[in-house]
């Protein structure tokens, strides 16, 4: 059995909280300087960004949020766990923390959430770093995720057995030796009960299968407005062995942001930062250096 103290050594950051109408949003805020805003997806949390936080906090102000229901944030039972709500929360976070000239760093659902917020506050964001993500209606839903959307099976698998988060420890990485007991414990730590897995389940339910789903329209609006961010420097980093956000998603972003810098990591999976942090850190550093000089 792995103790909390063991994974905590991998995540040695002070905790901060922002109250959103009485619901506490947890975040990391390390360093000073130009802000980097890191936005996670499902079923991860700010722990996913630990390597990048450590790498850049000496030169930048690195902030990493935990969405409501995720990580160390509150996990209320009666809450609108929708894409639009997460976007609204992130907009309030940007406003409350007075972020300007920020670089968005986003993965998985974090892309739609972060880009949705950037479109609401375009004057606050000066650069984009997108990793294995999407911000448009899904062109497909993988079978293993479709199964988790079935009403009874989904609840039992995701909230009862924690299979969605546990399976990701193996299916979302290519270098499984990096999933040490401490890393696995850290990724799973906030999701230790039926009640605490509510957001994992709601994120899966919020994936729109048809245009009738409200979140389909939210994603369509985001996609239709992304051209407004084309003048921001953009870096795309993609694990090419991702079964969820496949290379076709990268190609769509390349169409939207034709001037983007693109780095394909042939042997990395969906948890691209776990698979390839030692290659991602210099890519991000190069991008930040170039975009700062061009500012």
Image (cartoon, helix red, strand yellow):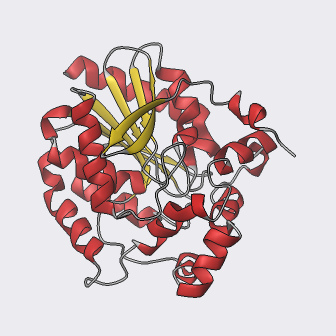
Residue visible at 52% across and 69% down?
A: 201
Quadrant into which the C terminus falls = top left
> Can you say whether 239 is above or below 7 in the image?
below
Residue visible at 21% across and 22% down?
A: 294
Residue visible at 15% across and 40% down?
A: 122
Q: Is residue 79 left or right of residue 51?
A: left
Q: Is residue 176 left or right of residue 159?
A: right
Q: Give residue 27's position: percent from left, percent from top.
A: 45, 34
Residue at the extreme front of the image, as rendered = 22
Residue visible at 47% across and 63% down?
A: 77
Q: Is residue 256 left or right of residue 148?
A: left
Q: Is residue 289 left or right of residue 186?
A: left
Q: Give residue 96's position: percent from left, percent from top.
A: 25, 32
> Can you say whether 107 is above or below 38 in the image?
below
Q: Nearer the viewer, residue 80 or 108?
A: 80
Number of callouts in the render?
0
The quadrant holding residue 210 is bottom left
> Can you say whether 145 is above or below 60 in the image?
below
Tell me, yes or no, if residue 287 can be seen here.
yes
């Amino acid at each position: 059995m792995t103790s909390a103290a063991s994974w905590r050594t991998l995540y040695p950051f002070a905790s901060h909280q922002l109250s959103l109408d009485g619901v506490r949003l947890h975040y990391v805020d390390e360093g000073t300087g130009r802000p980097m805003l890191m936005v996670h997806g499902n079923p991860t949390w700010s722990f996913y960004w630990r390597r990048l936080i450590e790498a850049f906090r000496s030169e930048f102000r690195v902030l990493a949020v935990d969405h409501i229901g995720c990580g160390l944030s509150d996990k209320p039972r009666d809450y609108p766990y929708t894409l639009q709500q997460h976007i609204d929360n992130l907009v309030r976070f940007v406003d409350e923390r007075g972020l300007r000239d920020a670089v968005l760093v986003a993965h998985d659902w974090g892309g739609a959430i972060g880009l949705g917020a950037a479109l609401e506050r375009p004057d606050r964001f000066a650069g984009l770093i997108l990793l294995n993500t999407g911000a448009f209606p899904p062109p497909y839903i993988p079978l293993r995720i479709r199964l988790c959307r079935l009403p009874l099976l989904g609840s039992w698998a995701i909230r009862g057995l924690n299979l969605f988060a546990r399976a990701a420890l193996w299916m979302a990485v290519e270098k499984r030796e990096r999933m040490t007991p401490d890393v696995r414990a850290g990724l799973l730590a906030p999701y230790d009960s039926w009640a605490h897995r509510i957001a994992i389940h709601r994120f899966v339910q919020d994936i729109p299968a048809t245009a009738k789903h409200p979140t389909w329209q939210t994603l369509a609006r985001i996609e239709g407005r992304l051209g407004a961010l084309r003048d921001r420097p953009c870096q795309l980093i993609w694990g090419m062995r991702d079964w969820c956000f496949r290379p076709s998603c990268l190609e769509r972003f390349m169409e939207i942001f034709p001037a983007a810098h693109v780095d394909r990591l042939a042997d990395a999976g969906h948890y691209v930062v776990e698979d390839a942090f030692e290659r991602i850190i210099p890519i991000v550093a190069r991008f930040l250096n170039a975009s700062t000089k061009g500012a």
